[in-house]
Amino acid sequence: MPSSRPKIPELTTVAACALACALSCVFGTLAPTMVHAQTPARESAQARAQSADTNAYIRGQMFEDDNQYDAAAQAYHEALVQSPASVPAMLGLERVLAELGRSSEILPLLDSALVLAPRESAFRTAQLRTFRSLGEADSARAAFERWVRAAPHDPAPYRTYSRMLIADGRTAAADTVLHAAQSDLGSARGFAYELAQLRAADGQWEASARAWRAALTDNNFLGQAALFSLAPTPAASRDAVRSALKMPPPSIGPLQALAQLELLWGSPRNGWDALRVLRPDSAVVAAWTEFAQRAADARAWLVARDALVAANEASPRPELVARAATAALEGGDAAGAVQLARSAEAKLDSASAARTVLEAHLRALAALGQPNEGERFLSLYSQYLSPDARDRYARLVAWGWVRNGRVDRAKRLLQDAGGDDDQIDGWLALYQGDLAHARELLSPSTNAQPELLTVLALLERTKAERSPEAGRAFLTLARGDTLAAAADFGAAAGTLPEAGSLLLATSARLYAARDSLGSAMAAWKTIVDSIPHAPEAPEAELELARALRRTGKTQASIQHLEHLILTYPESAMVPQARREMELARRAVPTSADSSSQPKR
Amino acid sequence: MRSIYTIAAFLLLALSQAARAQHLLVPMDDDQSNHLKAYGLTYNALLAGGKGEWLLNYRGGSFLLPDTPALRREAGLDGVTVEPLDDAALSDIRGEMSGANMDAVPLEKAPKIAVYTAPYTAPWDDAVILALRYAGIPYTPIWDEEVEHGDLKKYDWVHLFHEDFTGQLGKFYLAYRGAPWFEEMQKTNMDMARKLGFPNIPALKKDVAEKIREYVANGGFLFAMCGATETLELAIAGYKVDIASEFADGTPMDPNADSKMDWSRSFAFRDVHLEQSPFVNAMSDIDGHQANVPGRRQPLGTFTLFAFSAKFDPVASMLVQDHRSVIPDFYGVTTSFMRNRLKPGVTVLAEEPGAPWVKYIHGDYGKGSWTFLGGHDPEDPQHAIGNPPTDLSLHPNSAGYRLILNNVLFPAAKKKPLKT
């Protein structure tokens, strides 16, 4: 197939040579290195040769960058003819030959280079890599042994070869090499990283963790590698890994790795418990702050809060407190968030407080049902807020009034704030049962909450102008009383028959979310039995079947699933119903199955 | 007046015929939404006393079943694609088949299926059990005690999977001797050997292998996969030879075992070289891939199913019915079979072109027949010990698993007189 890339014309080649000369003058240190000793008598001739091989080397790089591997191989080869022990040219040739599938061609050149520079680790490593890529395990082993003989006290051959073996899954062979290193070099110190990888590959998690502790104590940057290696530790071996990484004296590298592992294993509190024992200094505070961010990313908000509070105590910074307040609020600790926000506000000037912590403070007060207090703070900081921010914060406080059931106060506050927001007005109208007004004001938005979708579906389904019962149900939900809201939705279903299945399905979902499965099942059953043509019927039947299976009524579950599949064959629920049926019939393994063996 | 009644009756009859066709075609080409459950639909139709036909090479090896409400219902529940056919449409199909490499094989009786599987929970899955469970095909698990008590004759079709019939427990002793599952495996096998009056596990397994050989010779259908293929052959040919390492029976393998093997007794292989070293995780040189021996392990390729003449070679045709003819290979304790170890007369059903090994083989033995498929799990090519079992609902159109299920239905076919 013809290449779509333009071929390098002669002019370009000339330019490349000129560029090469210039580069070799300016970046002399980048030019291929002659690793063998030079005698003064040969200096002049060799300078010319070096210039020639530099040109060839740079041409090789340009061809390689242009994916012209054949030409690149030829150029690198020329460079090696001039300077047989040039490391960059050799590595370049190794790369392009690999692309061409001709890796074996480099072996004679490596042999020649090694005669000139027998201890050069780049050549030795390239040789090992080549044998490995060719699948010549015996030759690789022999090359390793030659390297050891050429550099008897050098740990590099053991390290390179053992890493290669570990990557290939040849753990027993890697173990032998590391034993040999210990015996030949007198110590296994310096091989902690390889040992750690090896033990993990063998499933020896505790031994791996011990080795990682040694490696991480001196080389904190290996944390990601440790994480990758130890993350698959089975649950039964995790305590041993924890103990190994926590071994005294406490060291930041291993404990930081453990904290991140705990996040991966779904136990963020353990992670913070491991990290908090460190004596605070600047590095530890940075580690705590970073951990807090990771915990927040994992939605472990209260753990993030504790780490930020500790970081602030060690090195006070108001923005840490502001972040801690937000984390506390997200984690459901509204009272704690208020306390933290107040402490930050006390230390910050008003403008900074308004910018950093006020929002969390007002949200927390709204969540606690203290809109009076919210209004006071809003007025206190009002002069430091932009009109947009003031409007947004007024809405936060208004939600506080809604949570208290005071829709009238919420409306008044928003009117006083002067903002104009159809969505908010629509919600308030809905809460007061004014469906006609809500229908005018509410519309789909890009960040629609699930509740809004339910409201829009309701307003679409019914033409009623008013429904105090539906309004009350949504208001109870907004106030955070899920079970009472579920009951209200159930009651509203009877007053709006045209939307009855939607309101009943909402009621069932809320009951299920609060583990009130009996009430949820009753609502689903009412839909399935009494309103079988409703759009919610297939979903209700699927949920009912799932609930029946969870409560051990497998046969009843299967009957409902069969009914669903056969009655609503076009429903989007059918694939899920089939999946449920397979699980109920044990036709596919469940997550608890470790094997497919039948139980007898 | 009478003629009006006749016309009305005729119209009623015509309307009822229109509502329900006479036949259901279960297409097995890319139009099929769930190939694996289609086998279950067909099997269960036979189990319920119905008759069917296997339309070899027609649209991926389709099935023809009677159109009954029960079958329509089951197809709907399982998501199996069916196409109602009236007699005229079926006649067209038969016309098309008569002029091509296609044939219809009657399916008459659902075979009784036994799966030889140990009672302990091993940390690996069994592709056949997964396939049968997913397709909804009933089977009976049996193990050494049932085989020794002569229960094999109760079944038309017996499946073997991961058992090591040399009695060396897959040489797992080398790497897993401390693992709880291995200890349970060793104890359960040893207890069973003692219970049945055998001095050690190799002696028990060899006798079980012999019973399986007799079962096939007397007319049974055997399907084996993975390590069971190779070790069954070694146990049968080495019936009178010590082929187990010291860790298994207390004595080392007979150093002259190779020359003492009686390959006239085996199903598929001959002149095999046994692996003498207890430290090498391989049994012999039957397997081309040697997945568990680092220095010998061969990479996976793809294998190709042979196309047989449906009219002249229906058995081989049935075994290779598929909607794909090239299938990605998958490792197992025994992944493939070296060509130079196959006996003359063995039918190669699938091979990797250009490789010295084949993947899928079949042959007759006495009054029965056997089929061997190398590898462990067609949808998990690198399945390792401890990996979770494959969820076949994620692979309802698996071409590899179809090969297993072809073997399940193949004994249901009515034997026709050979045309050659």
Image (spheres, rainbow, N blue to C red):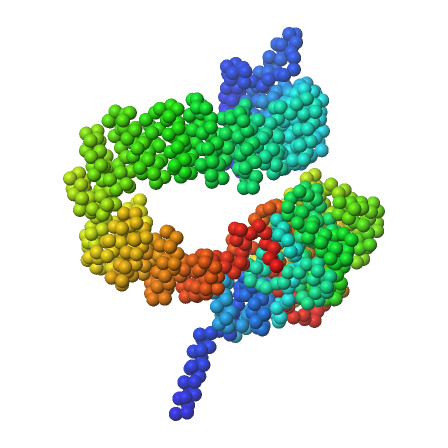
**Image side of residue B322 versus residue A357, left or right:** right
Name the quarter where the N terminus of chain A is drawn.
top right
Residue A465 higher or lower than B97, as above or below: above
Residue A158 appears at what percent x and percent y? 65, 26
Residue at the (54%, 58%) spot, across then down? A587
In front: A214, or A80? A214
Q: Nearer the viewer, residue B19 or A62?
A: B19
Residue appearing at x 51%, y 16% in the figure: A27
* Direction from residue A533 to residue A370 in the image, left or right: left
Vertical relation: A365 (above or below) A583: above
Q: Quadrant location of residue A342?
A: top left
Can residue A67 be seen here?
no
Measured as percent of width and height from the top left, residue B335 is found at 67, 49
The residue lying furthest to the bottom in this view is: B1
Residue A403 placed where, x, y %? 25, 45
Percent across and percent down for residue B56 are 60, 65
Residue most extreme to the top: A40
Q: In percent of the image, x 75 and y 43: which residue is there?
A: B278
Q: Residue at x 59, y 64 (%)?
A: B138
Q: Is residue A543 left or right of residue B93?
A: left
Query: How many numbered circles are shown?
Result: 0
State whether residue B108 is above or below residue A158.
below
Q: Nearer the viewer, residue A543 or B288?
A: A543
Q: Is residue B393 above or below residue A20?
A: below
Which corner quadrant holds the C terminus of chain A?
A: bottom right
Tell me if I can see residue A322 in this picture.
yes
User: For residue A564, what is the image quadrant?
Assistant: bottom left
Q: Quadrant of residue B128?
A: bottom right
